[in-house]
Image (spheres, rainbow, N blue to C red):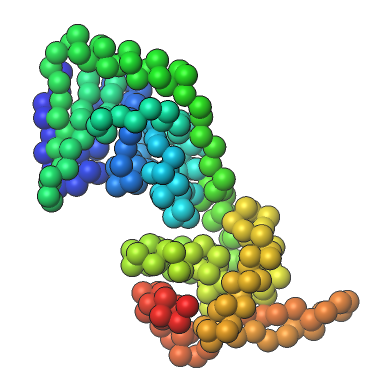
């Protein structure tokens, strides 16, 4: 049996709950905040953490996976068998964490989050049976976003370590600022490439090959950034065919740190 948990964040409650679980865990009907916290906590946990099967509604999953960083981290966990995603066919009354001999209902109130446990073995057995049966009948969810580890390694191999570092730091700054809708993974790629004087051909080929976006999407985003004067392009002759475009940052943006660059991009776009 488990004691009730009270903490200042969903992540703190989840960490304590996962430490209590001695068998695989089922997360039922997580909110957007809870699903993000599951990804963060499982990503940071050591190899002893139990696998987590998440039964999630389509609207919540879509909201979270629209965030490239969250979706790509989730894809890494799915690849590592630390996390699995399943379609929640029927709405649940509460967000729950279940394992063989324990459960928590996750409840938020103001700035505090509680994990409310049950101490009746018959009830715990019944709710486990209910949702494990539902899990057996659920449809697995496939993510279209590539794993972040794959994206990062390909960027290092194809473009370079510094561009990779800038890509992650700018994208993290955009996420922290709540600006991921404007400064998404494609815009971030182009800003990082421009900071490192990379060819549009090279960064768009990387993006298409790894599954970030198509070359056409990169081209359209480049035009938006260029029209907003956030990046510049210069023609680079090649032996055969049309010149290629090198991306650069104007001097006033090249001097900015990541947070200021994200802010400038949001305002300009």
Residue 69 at least partly seen: no
Q: Give the total number of marks visible in the rendering.
A: 0
Residue 159 at least partly seen: yes
Pick the front one: 234 or 115 = 115
| Residue 44, picture quadrant | top left
Pick the front one: 172 or 85 = 85
Residue 51 image offset from top left, x and y in percent: 39, 28
Q: Residue at x 68, y 86 (%)?
A: 234
Residue 98 image offset from top left, x and y in percent: 28, 24
Q: In which quadrant will I find the N terminus?
A: top left
Q: Residue at x 14, y 30 (%)?
A: 116
Q: Residue at x 47, y 78 (%)?
A: 269
| Residue 20, picture quadrant | top left
Residue 233 image offset from top left, x and y in percent: 64, 84
Q: Residue at x 51, y 62 (%)?
A: 185
Q: Residue furthest right?
A: 240
Residue 6 image offset from top left, x and y in percent: 11, 38
Q: Is residue 221 left or right of residue 256?
A: right
Pick the front one: 123 or 252 = 123
Q: Residue furthest top?
A: 122
In the rendered image of this protein, does residue 171 appear above or below residue 229?
Answer: above
Q: Residue furthest front?
A: 90
Pick the front one: 23 or 107 = 107
In the rendered image of this protein, does residue 235 appear above or below residue 59?
Answer: below
């Amino acid at each position: 049996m488990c004691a009730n948990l009270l903490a200042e964040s969903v992540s703190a409650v989840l960490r304590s709950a996962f430490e209590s679980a001695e068998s695989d865990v089922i997360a039922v009907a997580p909110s957007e905040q809870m699903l993000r916290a599951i990804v963060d906590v499982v990503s940071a946990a050591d190899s002893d953490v139990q696998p987590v099967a998440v039964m999630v509604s389509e609207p919540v999953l879509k909201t979270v996976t629209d965030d490239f960083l969250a979706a790509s981290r989730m894809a890494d966990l799915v690849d590592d068998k630390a996390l699995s995603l399943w379609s929640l066919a029927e709405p649940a009354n509460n967000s729950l964490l279940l394992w063989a001999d324990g459960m928590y209902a996750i409840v938020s109130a103001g700035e505090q989050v509680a994990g409310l446990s049950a101490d009746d073995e018959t009830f715990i057995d019944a709710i486990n049976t209910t949702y494990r049966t539902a899990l057996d009948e659920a449809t697995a969810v496939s993510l279209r976003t590539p794993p972040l580890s794959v994206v990062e390694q390909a960027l290092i191999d194809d473009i370079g370590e510094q561009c990779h570092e800038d890509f992650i730091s700018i994208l993290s700054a955009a996420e922290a600022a709540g600006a991921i809708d404007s400064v998404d993974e494609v815009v971030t790629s182009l800003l990082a490439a421009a900071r490192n004087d990379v060819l549009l051909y090279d960064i768009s080929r990387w993006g298409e090959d790894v599954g970030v976006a198509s070359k056409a999407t990169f081209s359209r985003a480049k035009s938006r950034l260029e029209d907003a004067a956030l990046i510049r392009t210069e023609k680079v002759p090649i032996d055969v065919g049309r010149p290629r475009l090198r991306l650069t940052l104007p001097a006033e943006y090249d001097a900015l740190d990541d947070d200021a660059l994200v802010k400038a991009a949001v305002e300009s776009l």
